[in-house]
Image: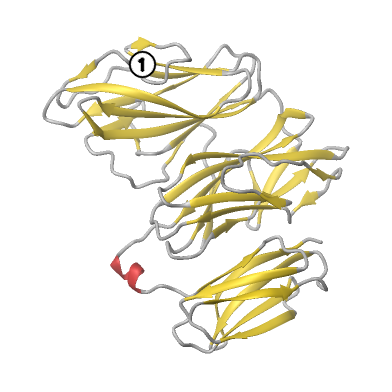
Amino acid sequence: MKKLLLSAIVGFMAFSVLIAQNLTLTTLEGNPVPANSVLVLEGNPSDLETVAYVNITNNNSYEVDLRVKKVENFLTSGSECQFCLGLCYPPFVYESTQPFPLGAGATTANEDFSGHYLPAGNAGLSSVSYVFYDFNNPGDSILFTVNYDVTDMDPTLSLSWEGGNLEDNSTVEFSGNPDVMAIASYIYVTNNDGQPVDVHVKRIVTHVLPGTVNYFCWGACFPPDVNQSINPITIGAGATNSTDFIGDLEPNGQAGISYISYVFFDASDASNYSTVNVQYNTMVTGIDDFQAVEPSVIAYPNPANNFVNIDYDNLVNQNARIVIYDLLGSVVKEINVTDNNGSIKNINTSTLNEGIYFYSLVINNESKDTQKLIIKH
């Protein structure tokens, strides 16, 4: 299941169900800020700073020593970030050092906490998380993240997906069972300029569930510890690249929501960029979700060149086959499978034209899982 969530330019987007225990957050207007939510703030490179505010409430029956830790997920080169909690700390300090007593049932006053982003004339997307915790009980904590989107131009790059066009900083949700091998996100990139543009991709991991693994492909597929594409891909004037980007998350049985941003930018002008925020949702709504595991299938490498491997599982002794078909629905390959869990290696794709295909796990003549396959020679 996939669905589009268009977020406001300035607004919180909840993406996790982690329990914050007895500390909670609200906006200055008193609206709840969910644990692990994300705030997108716009700014201009010429601004002195862009500032995020939240209030913290202590729901304990006793006073806590409130502290905050800053986690810089990614900062645009030349920019800095600092925070205030009672006292203001310089950018090189990542954790408050002075006690901030917060009484039982009390809430911080407006602007007691503020997260300051200083662009210093540099355009780009930066992501910073703030973790609030009780110094005497660090397990009582809550986190929220700010994406500081600082630019003074409309990007010539625009993004879309199979559901249609995406506004800059839109959020798209891709979901699946915690037991699937991977959840893939496909984003298309359009160059609206009159000249070809060399485009890079940068991954910003805001929050992922422990035990999961994520990576991305931009032409080549990169290992999980690589956050930016090595070589740019040229997109012609007015052209759309709909085959080269894939974002993958392997849930490894973990239920919840992971949040990753992908920034597509001009290799010769990093201030020309467009961003999509992807929520990978592996939520479990009840115990039955664990008991009724659906059959699943995944192909790799994807994009494929001359061959592809296909793994499948949870067939439960059913009559099954894997079918690959093109955009017109014509079957180009069909392979019978017999094992409940297995793999079909080195399926020849050298004779297939470059482009988008689909592969389905068909059980008793009913399609159970369909995914996209990209052929790129």
Residue 102 screen position, x and y as percent:
20, 20
* Residue at 82% in and 61% down: 377
Which residue is found at the position 83% from the left and 37% from the top?
193
Q: Which residue is mark 1?
A: 111
> Can residue 28 be seen at all in this image of the molecule?
no
- Expressed as whole percent of the image width and height from the top left, the position of residue 181 reads 51, 64
> Is residue 313 visible to the viewer in this orientation of the structure?
yes
Rendered view: 78 above or below 357: above
The percent coordinates of residue 143 (x first, y second) are 36, 34
The residue closer to the viewer here, 254 or 345, is 345
Q: Quadrant of residue 97?
A: top left
Q: Secondary structure at mark 1?
A: loop
Residue drawn 52% across the image and 37% down it: 8
Quarter assignment of residue 87: top left
In which quadrant of the rendered view does residue 330 lie? Answer: bottom right
Crowding near pointer 1: few (<14 within 10 Å), some, many (20+)?
some
Q: In the shown orientation, is residue 282 left or right of residue 9? A: left
Q: Is residue 292 above or below residue 271?
A: below
Give the residue type at disc 1. Answer: Glu
Left or right of 222, for residue 231: right
Q: Measured from the top left, where is residue 36 in percent x and y?
A: 39, 39
Give above or below for 84 relative to 145: above
Pick the front one: 237 or 255: 255
Q: Residue at x 54, y 50 (%)?
A: 214
* Vertical arrangement, residue 328 with respect to residue 211, above or below: below
